[in-house]
Amino acid sequence: MKAIRHLTLVANPTKPRALELCAALAAAARATGIHVTTHTTYPPPPDALAHCDACAVLGGDGTLLGLVPQAVAHQVPLFGINRGKLGFLAHYPSENVTESLHAVLRGDCQIVHRTLLQCRTPGGQRAIALNDIVVKAHHHAHMARLRVRTQDTHINTYRCDGLIVTTPTGSTAYNLSAGGPLIDPAADVFALTPICPHTLTDRTLIFPRDTPLTLDALDPQTPLHIAVDGITLAHAQPRLPLDISLAEEKIPLIQPRGFSHFELLRSKLHL
């Protein structure tokens, strides 16, 4: 990891003590001679991560996910100070936050590069996701009918509330709640999990990197909702087919040295 000379701080003001901790971190970093830029509105400006060496995100996992497109575009490592709930991505606790900052500044940390998903709409719009891409019926009382294929091969037709396409990182999120498996974040795969499928034998499928998926809507009367990392991409009537695959880019994340994903799982999920 290169030396951090310019640090950007992004605080979600809706999270308890996020602004207070942001001010403390900014003061501690400036005291070491680091140039600091702070953003205390959320979401931050679209160029918030331009020209910085690292970004500290004060909020929860959702706050960090909102910075993913910028972090990928500028290849800026992110590290999260958890002011949310579970903290699967915001790995640094808010206690002793200045000690955590000093550890990062002196390089006492590790950088991991996590797999990303990408999707493209028929109009050419591209979006990337660190956690998941979800296609579901826009109205909660309706069921979607979705066909999934890879190139010329038909995989399955689902009658369900929707489909979750998840990265290994996102396997602990909506995928897990829908009955999907936990996946080691180092695995170069992605998974497709149906949400409340009409056929009980429809279960998660796991695909290798070089498998592009195409999702088609078979019922034009059912409006669909497409979300990328929880952010609405489109309300479709229906705006499909949607092409989904693993992205060429990866995102750099800063973790405490010696961080263990499985220790995190045991702690957060009480395994």
Image: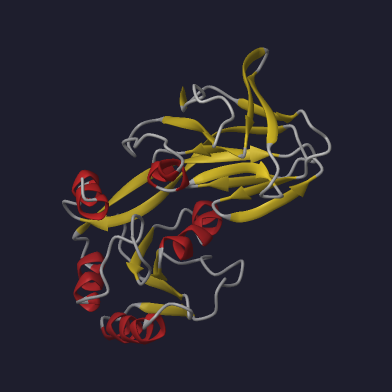
In front of the other: 265 or 109: 265
Image x and y of residue 265, in percent: 25, 48
The C terminus: image quadrant:
top left
Image x and y of residue 208, in percent: 45, 23
Q: How many marks?
A: 0
Q: Residue furthest left?
A: 258
Determine whether 114 is above or below 98 in the image: above
| Colour scheme of the picture | secondary structure
Determine whether 88 is above or below 180 in the image: below
In front of the other: 174 or 211: 174
| Left or right side of 19 for 81 | left
In front of the other: 175 or 2: 175
Image x and y of residue 4, in percent: 33, 66
Q: Quadrant of residue 262?
A: top left
In front of the other: 2 or 18: 18
Determine whether 247 is above or below 96 in the image: above
- The residue lying at 67 percent from left, 46 percent from top is 226
The N terminus: image quadrant:
bottom left
Image x and y of residue 212, in percent: 59, 25
| Left or right side of 18 for 200 | right
- The residue lying at 73 percent from left, 39 percent from top is 121
- The residue lying at 34 percent from left, 55 percent from top is 88
- The residue lying at 37 percent from left, 44 percent from top is 113
